[in-house]
Image (spheres, helix red, strand yellow):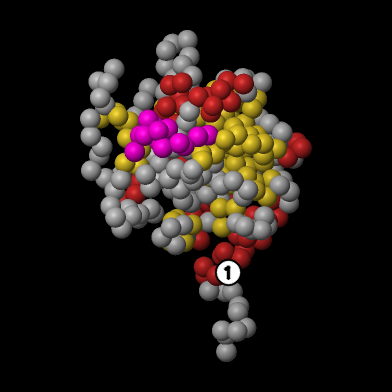
């Protein structure tokens, strides 16, 4: 067990958590990568205890039957939401935020307990190991934390609860993780077959970024740095999603969902992205 003075440090910018240590790391691996950034005033760190003392709290809200969102107020890091998928076998927590409290844990217990934790990509891991340890199994290990094998090097807080998977794994009946790449090699979506009235839904984080207006999505290597995904990565992503039946997409931030017609929205958005990426798009105001 770590000494009492050790702290599991949380990056203030991305809200990813690191292993307990007396002092924080020199920098955050996520934020020094070319997809993210270190603020101009430098690297800053916090902790669950400090965030709680500052008044942060978790808030639950319904997204659709069987899916609830978990947000942190005031926001932590990039302010993404977690999504809780309830099943008869237990709940799957998707893209956990960078803070939790007793209200968050109670909400999952009320939903039947935590079956496991998954994330769309390394930016949205939050305090996933804290979640795992709040729900230990009979063997004393925490609830599974499913990580794509292609992103194994991005596990910032190693733990026995981390379970590596490859291209596809059903983590509960009708709830399936699918690796599609794009943002990261291991970027993934969670397919929920019973969602959207049985038509199926994708939980995507920003592997597929749901945009304002509820009718378009986009695909980027980096959103803050505005780096596009190459066309070959887009093709792989679309090929991975094509076999999945879905009518809804739920994105990584509160309110960013396409509740119906999402398959068509994905196709139209991909065509639009490809046209501008490859130079085949036409703007009459700019073309001579």
Q: Residue at x 57, y 89 (%)?
A: 288
Q: Is residue 11 above or below residue 160?
A: below
Name the element at disc 1. helix
Q: Is residue 174 magenta?
A: no
When asked about the image quadrant of residue 248, the answer is: top right
Residue of label 1 = 275
Left or right position of 213 against 220: right
Residue 252 visible, this orientation: yes
Q: Residue at x 60, y 78 (%)?
A: 282
On the image, the x and y values in percent for residue 41 come to: 29, 55
Bounds of the magenta segment:
46-58
Q: Is residue 86 above or below residue 180?
A: above
On the image, the x and y values in percent for residue 181 come to: 49, 47
Q: Identify which residue, 179 or 45, lies in the foreground.
A: 45
Q: Identify which residue, 260 or 56, lies in the foreground.
A: 56
**Badge 1: few (under 14), some or many (20 or more) residues near its Cα, within 10 Å?**
few
Q: Residue at x 73, y 51 (%)?
A: 261
Q: Is residue 273 above or below residue 132?
A: below
On the image, the x and y values in percent for residue 201 come to: 67, 41
Q: Is residue 48 magenta?
A: yes
When asked about the image quadrant of residue 274, the answer is: bottom right
Residue 118 visible, this orientation: no
């Amino acid at each position: 067990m770590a000494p009492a003075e050790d702290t599991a440090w949380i990056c203030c910018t991305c809200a990813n958590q690191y292993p307990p240590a007396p002092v924080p790391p020199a920098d955050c691996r996520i934020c020094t990568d070319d997809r993210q950034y270190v603020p101009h005033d430098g690297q800053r760190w916090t902790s669950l205890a400090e965030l709680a003392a500052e008044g942060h709290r978790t808030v639950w809200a319904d997204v659709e039957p069987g899916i609830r969102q978990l947000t942190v107020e005031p926001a932590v890091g990039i302010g993404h939401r977690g999504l809780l998928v309830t099943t008869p076998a237990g709940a799957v927590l998707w893209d956990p935020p960078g803070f939790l409290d007793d209200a968050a844990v109670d909400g999952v217990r009320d939903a039947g307990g935590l079956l496991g934790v998954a994330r769309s990509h390394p930016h949205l891991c939050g305090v996933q190991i804290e979640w795992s340890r709040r729900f230990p199994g009979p063997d004393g290990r925490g609830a599974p934390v499913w990580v794509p094998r292609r992103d194994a090097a991005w596990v910032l807080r190693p733990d026995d609860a981390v379970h590596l998977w490859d291209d596809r794994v059903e983590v509960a009946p009708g709830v399936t993780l699918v690796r599609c790449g794009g943002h990261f090699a291991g970027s993934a979506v969670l397919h929920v077959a019973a969602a959207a009235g049985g038509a199926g839904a994708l939980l995507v984080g920003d592997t597929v970024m749901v945009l304002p207006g509820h009718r378009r999505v986009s695909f980027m290597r980096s959103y803050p740095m505005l780096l596009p995904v190459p066309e070959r990565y887009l093709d792989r992503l679309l090929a991975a999603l094509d076999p999945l039946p879905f009518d809804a997409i739920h994105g990584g931030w509160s309110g960013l969902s396409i509740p119906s017609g999402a398959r068509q929205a994905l196709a139209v958005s991909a065509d639009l992205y490809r046209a501008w990426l490859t130079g085949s798009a036409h703007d009459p105001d700019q073309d001579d």
